[in-house]
Image (cartoon, rainbow, N blue to C red):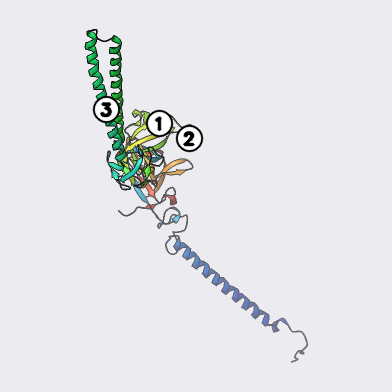
Amino acid sequence: MIEPSSGGPRGPASRPKPSRLRILIGAIVIVLIAVGLALMLSFCARSTKSDGGPPGGGHGRRGQGGSAGGPGGGPLITVGVATASLGPIPIQVSALGTVTPVATINISARVSGMLDTVAFTEGQIVRKGQLLAVIDPRPFQVALQQARGQLLHDQALLETAKVDLTRYRTLRSQDSISGQTYDTQADLVRQDEATVSADQASVANANLNLSFTRILSPVSGRVGLRQVDAGNQITANQATPLAVVTQIAPMTVVFTLPEGAIGPLERHRGGAGLAVTAYDRAGGAVLGQGTLATLDNQIDTTTGTVKAKAVFPNTDSALFPNQFVSVVLLVDTLQNQIIVPTTATRHGPQGDFVWVLQPDKTVKARPVTVGPGTAETVSIAAGLKVGETVITAGGDRLREGSKVVLPRP
């Protein structure tokens, strides 16, 4: 047997290494493919489970209407519901207003003198006619006595002149004196009568000035801060008042209404007597219940509004002078209206609609015509019947035919 030389070429049967390399590479590729398939199956299983389908995903695939969700296999949506019912709907107009006192009085002295006594406390509630301050009365008492003395003096002169006139009348009848003498005495009597009348006015004026030394409250209300202390010299009608008294019961609120509200108000006797509710500036707390007093006699052309005034009893002093309030005017009340919560109505490209609950626990969009309403409820003029159930919460996630879950009772 002849063996080939070591340097000669080898045949194909003598080269096994390339075949083993190809086998090794093929095995690695198969392993990688198997791992990839395993990962894909695991991901699909998790995705199907998260979509609400049953394990294995046989009938819970998206778009096949799986039994664990609504259309498309999505999760069921828990919603809030309400039933359309009949009831009244108030027609209201809201506005911003300012609390305006019926009377605000600057308490000032009407005579000059030294402020002797301050008889009120800052912030005190006073009654009409209650003493607030006293000016030193002694100079005015002296002036009154002087006026009375002058009156007595002139009254005595008048009596003397009248006696002389009586005598002259007798003498004239006897032709003992001339007529001129009698006429002169008669004129003197008339002069003394005028003097006495002037003296009586002086006495009344002195008495009036003496009464002005006692400063009384012209209205019932709350006294503000004291502006002048006792012991100061004050003058009549000075610029700085002693204090300010504000009447707080009743209280008025002045607010503005759009000119479009004038017509409905005029149909109700000018709006006088309509109910008005005053809220705080945030619109949360009720401050008082009152009635509309009147409308202004002209419209403000710059704003297109008209001023209105409402009167409130304000017995609890909840309304404070110059306070900003929110006002709600009740213009009318519509009876037997179909009412749903305000949250049930929605707005779409085709207009207003509501989600109506069907007997199979699915929802259907129903176009409606929305009427007047309040912050909590709204009336439905057309498109809904009494007794139908509408969705009030969770409607943002709904689609036509979505299956929903109702809240527990």
Q: Is residue 328 left or right of residue 48?
A: left
- Which residue is rendered at x = 23% and y = 22% of the image? 159
State yes or no: discs 1 and 3 in contact (Cβ < 8 Å): no
- Mark closest to the chain's N terminus, 1 or 2: 1
Counting from the top left corner in percent of width and height, residue 64 is at: 45, 55
Q: Residue at x 42, y 36 (%)?
A: 256
- Between circles 1 and 3, the one closer to the viewer is 3
Q: Residues within 10 Å of mark 1 (few under 14, many from 20)?
A: few
Left or right: 31 with respect to 152?
right
Is any part of residue 86 visible from this angle? no
Classify residue 149 as left or right of residue 99. left
Q: Which mark is residue 296?
A: 1
Question: Which part of the image, by quadrant, shows the N terminus?
Answer: bottom right
Report the front residue among 58 and 54. Answer: 54
The residue under label 3 is 153
Using the image, tell me which numbered label, if any, was put on residue 78: none
Instruction: Residue 310 in the image: state x and y as whole percent.
Output: 35, 36
Q: Residue at x 27, y 31 (%)?
A: 149
Q: Which residue corresponds to mark 2?
A: 303
Q: Nearer the viewer, mark 3 or mark 2?
A: 3
